[in-house]
Amino acid sequence: MPARSAIVASRIGLHARPASLVSLAAAEIGVPIELAAHGRSVNAASILGILSLDVNHGDEVTVSAEDASAVDRLIELLERDLSEE
């Protein structure tokens, strides 16, 4: 399964708006995508799952999915400051 890591660029981490944008994008992709941080893995389409990871600015996360383009799409989001969008 393809997997890539990224450093979270959002100033507020994956909380509120950034978590919402990531979960919506994962749901729209239509394939199961996992987001891992701090030794835990959650469904990337679940905003509650993302929030439960308690990811802050500068934390490393890993995205994995059967589809490499799905991984790339979420990595692209995570490497932007989504708190401003």
Image: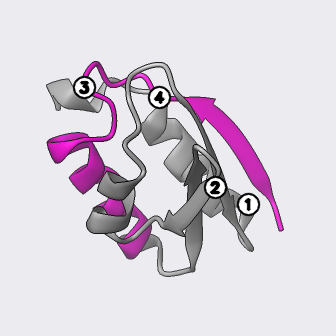
- Assess whether mark 3 and mark 4 are in contact (beta carbons under 8 angstroms): no
Q: Is-magenta flag for residue 65?
A: no
Q: Is residue 30 above or below residue 80?
A: below
Q: Earlier in the sequence, mark 4 or mark 2?
A: 4
Disc 4 from disc 3: Cα separation = 9 Å
Image mark for residue 8: 4
Nearer the observer: mark 4 or 1; the answer is 4
The crowding category of the residue bearing disc 3, from other C-alpha atoms within 10 Å (few below 14, some 14 to 19, many at least 20), is some
Determine which residue is flagged by label 1: 68
The quarter in which the C terminus is drawn is top left
Separation of disc 3 and disc 2 at Cα?
22 Å
Mark 2 residue crowding within 10 angstroms, few (<14) / some (14–19) / many (20+): many
Residue pointed to by mark 2: 71
Q: Amino acid at mark 3?
A: Ile
Percent of width and height locating residue 17:
16, 44
Which amino acid is tagged 4? Val
Please provide percent x and percent y for residue 2. 81, 60
Point out which mark residue 12 bears: 3
Q: CA distance from mark 1 to mark 3?
A: 27 Å
Residue depicted at 59% across the width and 57% down the height: 40
Q: Which residues are magenta?
A: 1-27
